[in-house]
Image: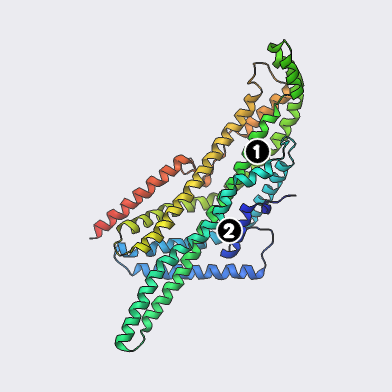
Amino acid sequence: METFNFFNLHKANVRNSCILGLLVPGPKRQGASFKAFVFALDVYQVSVFCFMIYGIFYQTRIHSILVDIDAAYCTLFGFAVSFYYSFCTKSFENILSKIDELTEACISDPLDKGHTFRTNIITENALLSKCTSIIPLSMSLCPFIFYAVTIVKMIKISGEEENESGSIDHSQIAEAAQVVVSMMSIQLGITRKASVEWFVLSLMAHIRTYFNHLEATLMQVFQLDNNNVDEQLNSSHFGNLFNHSQGVALPKAKDKLKLWIQIHQKLLRLTEDLIRVLSPFLAFYLVNITSLSALTVYAITMDKELNLVEKISMGYFGVTSMITLFFLCFFGSQLYLKSEKLAEAAFWKSFEDGDSTVSKEVHSCLRLILWRSHSPVLFAPYKSPTFTFTNESFVSFSRSIISFFFAIKKIRSMTY
């Protein structure tokens, strides 16, 4: 059987998860050494987060703590992702096993005469595979570049003071060490954040490919026999084409519909399980990405103490996060529309050439498809009708970020 790990998109996710200490199910089970590595990273992130919160409480000026709050958010997200993955490892294993079963069903689907599913799933997700390989790792450079400027300044000041006094300022060295420790934790948090975002995107991309496969094979369900069609076209009784060919096509349609329904049902169950598992994460993610983006925008535009290099590094992080959010909403919107129209297209496909009725067995199959698709696939935390991952919601999220930005600005003006 061709497993999910065969595809480059999931290979990139497994590789990233191993580097970052995330328990994403892969081709091999993680041993005790890897679990100890994950535990050590989690303890490290929690410790750094506590020190960050302790430092933030001792600062009074809002503009001076924005970057620290941003950094604490990233560290918290990195730990939360690791905890969530550890808690849902079994659920993810079940989901990936269902993806393997669905992939095998699509590859061996007799309706796909050209066996193009394997090619389609690779070509459709090729760009996402490259993004999954590049973007999470490239985002780890953001805190490195940002804090490298701070470290260089501290080393330069420490060197000047050493030349003047002739002694080493150990407090400057200790402060530089603290900055390095925090920088590494923030790098881990940001990279984990990007990695899990693209892991969710990869699952959405595969589901979209399954819907594309069902949409393509739907045309094969009611397709008339080519020889029969040619014979009717050459005859003089062209007006009786549909009525004459109906008896030939519909018995085949019944068997094809049953195969099509089996794959459709597996896909619906897969998406239901996936949304159920992801609901807590999606709720936390939306709160986090909204506040994090607003703080980032505010720090870039309003904090005059940041230099150009620091603003560029924060800007890349903010822009990339918003692009990822847009992709999540874009794919979520596509899945919603495809799942909504697919059952309706299946129902009306047999009636598009005329008003003749189909057999009871075919009609029962069509009603079954329509009943099972009464609610479209919609990625949302806890099936929320308000906070959904669609194109319309992305606009709402952007407005929320802008509103949060002005709220921070207003709080700052009140403190002066």
Horizontal side, residue 132 vs residue 241: left or right: left
The answer to whether residue 120 shows anywhere in this view is yes
In the displayed structure, would residue 329 be above or below residue 81?
above
**Amino acid marked by disc 1:** His
Q: Nearer the viewer, mark 2 or mark 1?
A: 1
> In the shown orientation, is residue 19 left or right of residue 27?
left
Label 2: few (<14), some or many (≥20) within 10 Å? some
* Image location (x, y in percent) of residue 401: 38, 49
Provide the residue designation for mark 2.
Answer: 85
The extreme front residue here reads: 234
The reply to whether residue 80 is in sight is: no
| Residue drawn where x is 59% and y is 70% of the image | 37
Q: Amino acid at mark 2?
A: Tyr
Q: Please report whichever mark, 2 or 1, sits nearer to the chain's N-terminal start.
A: 2
Give the image quarter of residue 222: top right
Furthest residue toward left: 416
Distance CA(mark 2)–CA(mark 1):
30 Å
Q: Tell me the residue at 43%/61% (across/down).
A: 73
What residue do we see at 28% from left, 56% from top?
411
Task: Identify which residue, 226 or 341, lies in the foreground.
Answer: 226
> Does 177 appear above or below 381?
below
Q: Which residue is mark 1?
A: 213
Q: Position of residue 189 (x, y in %)?
A: 49, 63
Give residue 305's position: percent from left, percent from top.
30, 65
Q: Residue 9, percent across and down?
A: 61, 52
- Circle 1 — which element? helix
Whether pointer 2 and pointer 1 mark residues with C-beta atoms closer than 8 Å, the reply is no
In the current view of this chain or complex, which residue is farthest to the bottom? 166
